[in-house]
Image (cartoon, rainbow, N blue to C red):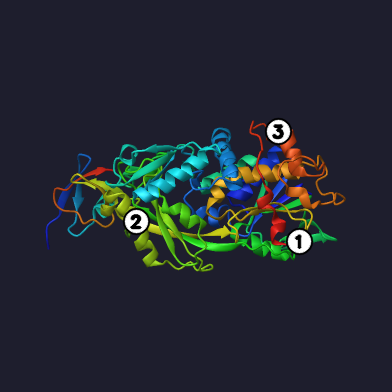
Amino acid sequence: MPDVVVIGAGVVGAACAYYAARAGLSVVVVDQGTVAGGTTGAGEGNVLVSDKEPGPELDLALLSSGLWAELAAAVGGFEYEPKGGLVVAETPEVLTALTGLAAKQESSGVRAAVVDPEEYEPHIARGLAGAVFYPQDAQVQPMLAAARLLRASGAEVRTGVRVTGFARSGDRVTGVRTDEGELRAGAVVNAAGTWAGDVAALAGINLPVLPRRGFILVTEPLPEPLIRHKVYTAAYVTNVASEDEGLETSAVVEGTPAGTILIGASRERVGYDRNIAYPVLARLAEQAIALFPALAGKQAIRAYCGFRPYCPDHLPVIGPDPRAPGLYHATGHEGAGIGLAPATGLLISQLLTSSSGQLGSSDRPVPSSRFGSSSGSDPSDPFAELSESGGLGGSGDRLDIDVFPFRPERFA
Amino acid sequence: MTAPFEIVFSGRPIPVRPGQTIGAALHAAGIRSWRTTRINGRPRGLFCGIGVCFDCLLTVNGEPNVRACLTVAHPGDEVTPS
């Protein structure tokens, strides 16, 4: 019997498996499809600190940013590019708002510098008001990242296996039932991304994770690099946080090591509709050309879409679910799942091991303050234990994150 | 019917039947690969053959990123790998 079953072989599930295995736990990963076959395989591979307001999600992003650099060295093979992000403002008003945000982010540990966009991107449109450069922004190839982390974890990966229910002992989750039989485990991690709400429902739990569709347009591979950094307009930040159900687009443009240019980003709440929406693609292309006029002569060779898993409050769900002891969630990262995966995996692994061998025990009470920020006053608070232990599994980072906003029971 | 002619691929003459694409002429001459991937250096040439995959890119008369599978060959075309 494995210590942990992880549901979902996307990048978040892979990071959970990797850090859990590194903490000495035996792990089995199941996925209804393939490795990175869901939202992980449909993104750009963003590892961003630039697009987040100061707060717990930014803290998670900063921790993750450092962890991705470590993983690139320790695991590698997933096109990690610490190339930095350039956020551009078209007007002086937007630039004022952008530099104001950057100043707030800097006080949270983000590095940012007001720069001349033409100096950083020689092919960028003339006449922009200005830009802020974020050197900590990076990019990975997300499918390779998930695959490499899974392989490095040594976990048993079972693809094409659908979870159909949970094994329970009273309230307690003691494993998963699948279309290939029951799999008992000390704990179960729900890292099913956009489908995590459906998985939670199998345990009788409300977890409002919903799909927010996004398209990416891909150009032909260019002979010469046209774009050096991850470049996006300041409107992206407001779109990410928007409550609007209608179509929103903002230019997010970057090159890949294969020579193609990836053009995003759109956001719409249209369920799981996979039909190509040409008006969306046309807008993405227009906005990208406005930012990089030289793209006008290039061919778009394909487009793809994916479904970001979002929660109504736009925060991820990370941690044990007191409604089903033994079940942990690691989902709801919306468009930031690639970037936030390592910190999420590390957090989950620390939670799984924090009761020192008590994994699977049901006799510990679940105090309401369990997810309080690191006051350390509650001896049964696993997060407090994390904070007190200081080190993060040898990474040298201190887990100093207010995880209260991520707690699953906010949807109870 | 127009007479067969030649194009030049990296200095080598390649026979072409009128109407053939550059990709078809290279393939008929036994040339299967004219590009490598940037990261792992793996060989690439005709894959889909219908203009979709952009794997068969090469340079024709100085113009880069031309799809061999869609581009009809003309007498004297100078073709080089991308």
Closer-to-camera residue (A6/A285): A285
Task: Tell which circle, 2 or 1, labels the residue nearer the N-terminal end.
Answer: 1
Residue located at (36% from left, 45% from top): A259
* Residue at image mark 2: A287
Looking at the image, tell me whether mark 1 or mark 3 is earlier in sequence order.
1
For mark 3, name the chain: A
The residue sitting at 37% across, 55% down in the picture is B53
Q: Is residue A214 above or below residue A120?
A: below
Q: CA distance from mark 1 to mark 3?
A: 34 Å
Could you give the CA–CA distance between mark 3 and mark 2, rounded to whole angstroms?
45 Å
Location of residue A89 in the rendering, given as x and y in whole percent from the top left corner: 37, 48
Please state which of the two labelled residues, at mark 2 or mark 1, is closer to the viewer.
2
Q: Badge 2: how crowded within 10 Å, few (<14), some, or many (20+)?
A: many
Q: CA distance from mark 2 to mark 1?
A: 46 Å
Task: Please tell me whether residue A26 is drawn above or below residue A288 in the rendered image.
Answer: above
Q: Amino acid at mark 3?
A: Gly
Q: Quadrant of the C terminus of chain A?
A: bottom right
| In-front residue for pair A128/A343 | A128
Q: Is there a contact, CB below 8 Å, between mark 1 and mark 3?
A: no
Residue A71 can be seen, yes or no: yes
Q: Is residue A26 visible?
A: no
Disc 3 target residue: A390
Q: Secondary structure at mark 2?
A: helix
Question: Residue A245: x, y in percent?
Answer: 50, 67
First reached walking from the N terminus: tag 3 or tag 2: 2
Residue under numbered circle 1: A166
Are dots 2 and 1 on a single chain? yes
Q: Determine the chain carrying the residue at label 1.
A: A
Badge number at residue A112: none
**Residue A310 on image: x %, y %:** 57, 59
Q: Which element carries disc 3, helix, strand or loop? A: loop
